[in-house]
Amino acid sequence: MPQIILLLLLVGAGMLLYRRFIADAQKLQKRSEREEKERETGAVGTLVKDPETGEYRVKRDDE
């Protein structure tokens, strides 16, 4: 019985780590695509419009 519990804990931890890995990989891929597009167009940064104020600002990496 303790072996089954340990196995389930290991599988659960593995699944959480896998999901985190996939999320980080997708975030990195989006950033790389954005940087490649900026390089192609010669842009210095990507601008996003703030819906509340209507002002534009440079997009941060955490968005």
Image (tube, rainbow, N blue to C red):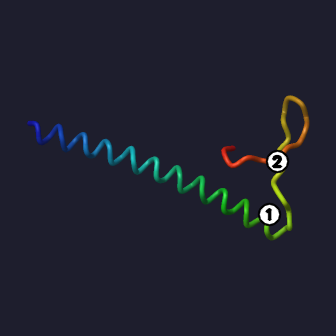
Does residue 29 sit above or below 50 in this rendering?
below
Instruction: Determine whether the residue tagged by mark 1 lies in a helix, strand or loop.
Output: helix
Where is residue 13 drawn, in percent x and y? 32, 43
Residue 38, compared with residue 52, is above or below; it is below
In the rendered structure, the answer to whether residue 32 lies left or right of residue 59 reads left
Q: Residue at x 33, y 48 (%)?
A: 14
Whole-percent x, y for residue 6 in the image? 18, 41
Q: Residue at x 17, y 37 (%)?
A: 5
Q: Name the outermost residue toward the top.
A: 52
Q: Quadrant of the N terminus?
A: top left
Number of numbered labels in the structure image:
2
Q: Where is residue 47 shown, x and y percent of the image? A: 84, 49
Q: Amino acid at mark 1?
A: Glu
Residue that extends furthest to the bottom in the rendered view of this protein: 40
Q: Which residue is mark 2?
A: 58
Classify mark 1: residues with Cα within 10 Å, few (<14), some (14-19) or many (20+): some
Q: Quadrant of residue 45?
A: bottom right
Q: 60 or 40, which lies in front?
A: 60
The type of residue carrying mark 2 is Val
- Which callout, 1 or 2, points at the residue further toward the start of the chain? 1
Q: Locate the C terminus and report the quarter of the image it occupies.
A: top right
Residue found at the very far left of the displayed protein: 1
Describe residue 56's horizontal placement relative to residue 27 as left or right: right
Q: How far, Cα to Cα, is label 1 from label 2?
A: 12 Å
Q: Residue at x 85, y 67 (%)?
A: 41
- Packing grade of label 2 (10 A; few <14, some 14-19, many >=20) is few
Image spot of residue 2 (x, y percent): 11, 37
On residue 38, which mark appears? Answer: 1
